[in-house]
Amino acid sequence: MSDQSRPASMSPSELERFGDVTRVRVETPDLNGGLRGKYLSADKVRSGKGIPITEVYLAATVDDDLFDTALSAEEAGNGDMLLAPDWSTARAMPGEPGVVAVLADGETKGRERHPMHPRSVLRNVVDRAASHGYEGVFGVEFEFTVFRDDPDSDRARRAGDVPGMTRISRSNQCYSLTRWADFGEFATDLDDSARAYGIPIEMMMTEVGTHHIEAALAPAPALQAADMATRFKVLLRQVAQRHGFFVSFMAKVNLAEQGTSGHLHQSLWKDGKNVFWGGKSDTLSEEGRHYAAGALRVSHECTAFFAPWPNSYRRYVPGFFAPVALDWGWDNRTTALRAITLSEDSARFENRRGGSDFHPYLAIAACLAGGVDGILASEELIEPGAPVPGRELPQDLATAAALLRKSELAREWLGDDVVELYAQSREHEVQAYAALAAAHIPRWEIQRYFEIV
């Protein structure tokens, strides 16, 4: 077993191995899948005092509106929680001399893991899986869109006109070596910066579309994989800016083109062996089949973690390689769960439900919880290619939030507090989306009726 689930601890002496450090960038995930944080003087961190952050940030939207929860209620007083740096994640910040970045867990004032903090929630799931002898290993695949940051793109972006933005390529070709010249220096900088930041990139390629790129991060234990995925999104935007690009992880930016996915490759290990391996290709162990059944269950009940925005559901369109049914298959990219069983070391499942906008900590927590719970409950797996009876995948965020709130598995493994808070946050997003839609006349309506009616 790795020691990834040990309690986070303050160890300011860890800074000394980085030489002349002037500031520490303390990073921590929010409820929307991004990183928040603050820059502290190195002397402040060396003092060993606690690092406070207002607890209400966990009840904030992407533009920092607050939704109605116990955390954001006026009588709660917007009090603090504490950030506990995990010094195993400390890295010299690429492009920022003298700055060390470190990820932090959320803790209550009593120094217990905060029940609504995404990293702490994943820690709890990791620990519970470990208590049964299991360690989950995850590899994250991100697709994302890249545009040139020029005046035309800026005007189009402000108008919400994606077709008007300047693409990085003229060709749509997937696996293209010709297109690489369009962004090769950016890709090299990204690879070097990511490695320095503790994010080894195993593969990068062009995806279908003039502005689509895919990157696969190296597999790692569950908590580390979530850390890498969340840091990657922040770093990618910083590197893109240096090269005159901007990127998006929206699941669907153009209805006529492919969406962007966030696939989760996952394996389960016990006593140094991959428990999914069935002895030959296109077979699974009994544990592997039960894990798959649990993984399908959370793909249904916890869709809100994999598709957390109203836009996410635009991606689920037949013919665009986004799963529209809850099913699995052998090396089948059209299913929600793809079984890959070429060798014992590489035997794994690929959860293809998520878009590139998924929540790394909570989606990985759900996958690991569902899979291990499936093993413990000896949950039966349907045959390859058959949709799970009675479990249709939600087609909108409101339905997904309601399913999450009713999920006994999510509540048992992740906790009532975070399930309730996250469901509330998605319901607020649905309301905000509806209000925005009602407040704007769409471009097509002007184009269709302005000169004719």
Image (cartoon, grey):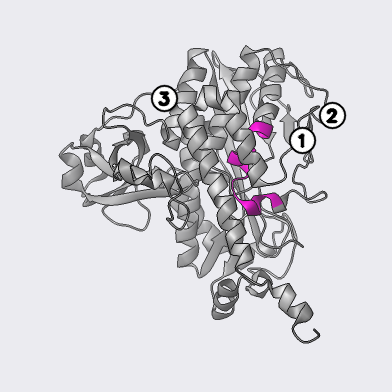
Secondary structure under tag 1 reads: loop
Q: Looking at this rendering, what residue extends furthest in the bottom direction? A: 451
x and y, in percent, of residue 53 in the image:
29, 44
What stretch of residues is rendered in magenta?
299-313
Between the residue at mark 1 and the residue at mark 3, the CA separation in whole angstroms equals 34 Å
Height in image: 372 above or below 296?
Answer: above
The answer to which image quadrant residue 183 occupies is bottom right
Residue nearest the viewer, comparing 25 with 56: 56
Height in image: 120 above or below 428?
Answer: above
Residue nearest the viewer, comparing 146 with 364: 364
Between the residue at mark 2 and the residue at mark 1, the CA separation in whole angstroms equals 12 Å
- The answer to whether the residues at label 1 and label 3 have Cβ atoms under 8 Å apart is no
Left or right for 329, reference 23: right
Residue tagged by mark 2? 386
Amino acid on which the number 2 mark rests in the picture: Ala
Residue tagged by mark 3? 5
| Mark before the other along the chain sequence, 1 or 3 | 3
Amino acid on which the number 3 mark rests in the picture: Ser
Q: Looking at this rendering, what residue extends furthest in the front direction? A: 75
Query: Between tags 2 and 1, which lies in front?
Result: 1
Residue tagged by mark 1? 392
307 in the magenta segment: yes
x and y, in percent, of residue 168 in the image:
63, 68
Structural crowding at the residue carrying mark 2, measured as other residues with C-alpha within 10 Å and reported as few (<14), some (14–19) or many (≥20): few
Q: Residue at x 73, y 38 (%)?
A: 393
Secondary structure under tag 3 reads: loop
Q: Residue at x 68, y 12 (%)?
A: 378
133 in the magenta segment: no
- The answer to whether the residues at label 3 and label 2 have Cβ atoms under 8 Å apart is no
Query: Between tags 3 and 2, which lies in front?
Result: 2
